[in-house]
Amino acid sequence: MSDLIFKIKKLDWFYFSLIFFLSFVGFVMIYSATSGMEYNVLFSHSIKIILGLFVMLIVAIIDLEFWKKNAFYLYFIFMVLLIWASFYGHIGKGSRRWINFSGFYIQPSEFMKICIILTLAKFFDEKRIKETRDYFFLILPITLVLIPFGLIVSQPDLGTASMILFISFIIFFISALSWKFFASIGIGFLIIAPYLWNSLKNYQKQRILTLFNPENDPLGSGYHIIQSQIAIGSGGTFGKGWMKGTQSHLDFLPEKHTDFIFSMLGEEFGFFGTISVIGLIVLITYLTYQIVNNSKIDTFQRILGFGIISNFFFAALINMSMVIGILPIVGLPLPLVSYGGSSMLTYFIGFGLILSIKLAVDRKY
Amino acid sequence: MITRDLSYTQKVRRRSLILGGIKSLFTIVVCGKLYYLQILNKSKYGKLSDLNRTKVKILYPERGVIFDKFGIPIASNRLDYQLTIFKEKKELINRYISKLKNIIFFSQRDYQELKKNLSIKDSSDFVILKKNLTWDELEIFELVSSKFPFLFITKEKVRSYENKFIYSHVLGYVGYKNDLKEQKLNNLKFGISGLEKTFDKKLLGTDGWIKLETNSKGRIKKELNKKLAIPGENVKTNLIASMQELSHKLLKGISGAVVVLDCKSGGVNCMVSTPSFDNDEFSNGISNDKWNQLVTDESNPLLNRSISGLYSPGSTYKLITALFAIEKMGFDYSKEFYCPGHVEFGNRKFHCWKKEGHESVNLIDAIKKSCDCYFYNLAKEINIDELAKFSKKFSIGELTGIDIPDENYGLMPNSEWKIKNRNEKWQKGETLNTVIGQGFTLSTPLQITLMTARIASGKKLEPKIFKRNRYFFENLEISEKNLNFIRKSMYKVVNEYQGTAYSSKLNNKLKMAGKTGTSQVRKISKEERESGVLKNEELIYKLRDHSLFTGYAPYDNPKYAITVVAEHMGNGSKVAAPIAKKIMDFALKKYS
C-alpha cells in the first residue's frame, strides 16, 4: 500500500498533464467537428479520454518488471485476437479488423503495436546481437513482426501494417544492429520494390502518384489533399477561429474528426495552432528522451521507451505530412487528437509504460 | 560483462541520438511546409477556400408593370421556376439531363439556350438548365432532388401577358438581345418591340446579386451578402383595357385595325391590329417552327397595322379636300354641282361610286353622301402641292410621333414626289384621284384617326400611348367656322337619312360624327365599267376593297376619335362603320 502511495506521489504529473492536454486539444477539435451537436460522439470521446487516462495510470503503477516478464504472453494473447479479427471480425472502413465485445469495438492490430514493441525490447535485452554470426537469431524477431504484419495487410489495413513494420525497423535500429544489416535490408527492399508496387491496389498506387501532382486529378484522389491544403493554408497565422472553419464545417474537408483533424486545427487556429501542437508533441518526445536516457544500463527500458515514443512521434508527424501533402494518404489518425478508440487507448497504454519506466528509473536512485 | 554492456548501452544511446536527429529533421520539414502553406500562401489558400464556399447569383430585376388608363395591369410578371446548376459542376449536366429527361421536358430551345448560357462568361456561379418548369415537373423533381447534388430550383419573376394577342402589337414583347455588349447579364430580357421597347430603360430596373455560402454537396447554407435588384418602374398608359378587348373581339376573323384617340389629350385609348400573335409565347422563347410560320403567314400577323399598315384613305380624305377648298381657296360651300355618275376630264372618264349619280349636290351633301363627282369638279381648281402641304397639318404623309417604334410615314404625293419617284410630271387627272383619297396616297389607321381627332378638336394633337398628366397643343390655325362646317357634314354622314353611315348611328343621345371610306385595291378597267362593275363579293379576297370608317363622338364635345379599317371587306358603311358604332356605344356608355 505504501508502495502505491509512493508511486502516485512520485509519478511524473507534469508529463501526465501534457498527455492530458494533448487529448484535450483532441476533444476541442472534435467538439468543433461535430459543431457541438452530436452529443453521442462527444460523450463517447470524453469517456474514452477518461478511460484512457485511467488505464495510463494503472499501467504506470504496475511494476515494469510485470510487462517485461509477460511480454511474450501478451503478444500471444493479442496474436490470437488478431487472427480472430482478421478472419471472423467485424468489417469497417473497408477492412476486417474489429472485434465486437458486447458493443465495444476493439482493434487488435492497434494493441499488437505495443505488444511487438514490448516483445522486441525483451528479445533484444536478453539476446544481444553484436556479431554477424548472431544474425541467425534474428529469424525469431523478424518472424514475430512479419506474422502480424501479414495478417494486418490481409485485412487489409495498410496504414497500421506499414506503421508496425516501420516501428519494428526503428527498434532494430535502436538495438544497435550493425549497419550491414540495414544495408542488406535496403538492397533486399530495392529488389522486391517493383513486385511490391505491382501488388498494390490501383487506388493505393493512385494515392502515391497523386502526392507528386495533386492538381492532376483535382476531383479524384487529389481532391482530399487539395481541400486539406486549402483548409490549412486559409487558416493563416491565427486561423479562422474555433468552430468557424469553412472548409471543415461546409464539408469540403473529408474525415475531419479522424485522419484530417489536423487540417481542421490548422484552419481554425492557424500557424499558431499547428506549431503549438507540434511543440507539444516535440516536448513530450523530448521529455521521454530524458526519462529513457536516465536509465543508464537497462536496455529493455531504453528500447521500450524509444519504441513507444517513436511510434507516437512518427504517427503524429506522418499524419501531419499526409494532410499537408508531403506523404501519401494512408489511413492513420493523429495520436490522442483524432476520434478513435483502440488507437487512442494504445497511446495511453504506451505513455503509461513510459511513466512506469520513469518510476522504475527513479526508484533506483 | 559490465564493460561489454556499457559499450552496448552506448551504442543504443548513439542510435537513439541519430533517431532524434531524424525526428528533428522531420519536424523541421513539417514546420517548413506549414510555414509555406499558412504564412507564405495564406492569401492564395484563403481565396481558394472562399471560392469553394461562396457562390454569386445574379438577381435579375423585375420588369415594371404596364397599366391601362384606369390602373388595370396589362403586362405584369409571373413567378418562373427554373432548374439551376452550379457552373463549376458543368460536367454533370449531360448526365443529369439524360436522367431527368423522363420527368422534365427539355425542348430543342432549352438545349440551345443552355448551350448559349454555358458559352457566355458572366459573373454568376450558376447556370439555368431549364426555365418554365411546370407544377408537375416541380413536384416530381422535389421528390428526387436529393439524387441530384448541385442542382436546385430557383425562382424568378418574368414577363407575362395575361391577355395574349390583344395587346401584342402595342405592348410588343421582350426577349434576349444578341448584340449585347455587357454580357454579364445573359438572362436579362429587353423590350424588343412596342411599348416594351420604347420604355425599356424605365421598365428594366437594375440588377443585383446575392452571395451565398454553400457546402461541398451544393446545399445552400446561408446568405452572406446581397444587393437587391431594383424593380423597373411601372408605366401608365392611355389604353383602356375594356375598349381594347372589345375592339379585338369585333375584329375577329378580319384583318384590320382599330385606333381610338382621346380628343383632349391625344392619348391612345385603343390600338388593335389583327390578326395578332401570342406575345407571351414570344417572350418565353418561341420555337423556330412557330417563328417561320408567323413570318411566312400571308396575313402578316407580326405587322402592327395601326401604325405600319398602309391604306388609301379613300373617301375619308374628302374631309381634307373639302376643308382645304373652303379654308385655302375661298370656295363657296353652297355651290352645287350636278353629278351624273361620272365626270369627264381630259380624255378620261372619272366615275362616282354611285353609277346613277347623285344629281345636284352642294358640298355638305357631297360629304354626307360621299359624292365623288363633286370632288372631281372641285379638284379641277386644286393645286396638288398646296393640298399636300395642307394635308400635313393632319399628319397625312407625316409621322405622328407615336411612342412606339416602326411607325410608317405613309405617302402624300405632290409634283416633286412624282418627278423624283416616277420620273414624270404630275398629271392634273391624278389630282382628281387624289382628292377622293385614291391614287398614290397612303396612310396608316393612326394617321386617319389623328386627322379626325385634329378636325374634332381643332388642335394639333399628338398621339401618345404613355399617359402624361400635362399636355398642351397648339391650335391648327384653321378658322373655327370652317372646321365646324366639316364637323357638321360628318354629323350628317352618321345621323341623317342618306348619310353613308346612317345605319351606324349611335344608340345614345350623344351623337357620333364620321366619314366612311372605301380603299380600292385594284383598278377598274374600262371594259368592266361597261359590262358592270363586279361586286366586292364576286372578287377574289385579295382584290376586294378595304372598308374604312373614321369618326368622333360626342359630336358637341369630342372625346373619342376612332378609325376602323377592315381589309377586303368592301365599302366603309358595311363593316367598318358598324364596328366603330359598337365601340363608341360601349365607350360612351361606360366612360361618360
Image: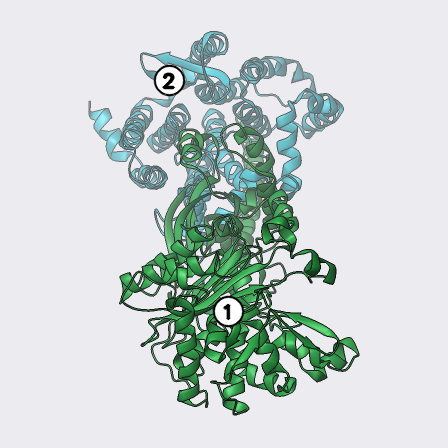
Chain colours: A cyan, B green
Where is residue B530 drawn, in percent x and y? 70, 59
Q: Along the horizontal axis of the image, is A141 left or right of A292?
A: right
The structure residue drawn at horizontal position 63% and vertical position 43%, both measured from the top left corner, is B289
Q: Quadrant of residue B502?
A: bottom left
For badge 2, the amino acid type reads Tyr
CA gap between label 2 and label 1 equals 89 Å
Give the crowd class for mark 2: few <14, some 14-19, many >=20 residues within 10 Å.
Answer: some
Instruction: Determine whether the residue tagged by mark 2 lies in a helix, strand or loop.
Output: strand
User: Toward the viewer: A180 or A283?
Assistant: A283
Q: Quadrant of residue B398?
A: bottom right
Where is residue B420 drawn, in percent x and y? 76, 80
Q: Relative to A233, is A361 above or below?
A: above
* Residue B336 in view in this figure: yes
Between disc 2 and disc 1, the foreground one is 1
Badge 1: chain ID: B
Q: Where residue A105 is drawn, which disc sits there?
A: 2
* Residue B237 in view in this figure: no
Q: Where residue B446 is drawn, which disc sits there?
A: 1
The structure residue drawn at horizontal position 46% and vertical position 90%, both measured from the top left corner, is B477
Q: Where residue A202 is drawn, which disc sits there?
A: none
Where is residue B559 drawn, in percent x and y? 34, 72
Check the image and name the residue furthest to the right: B423
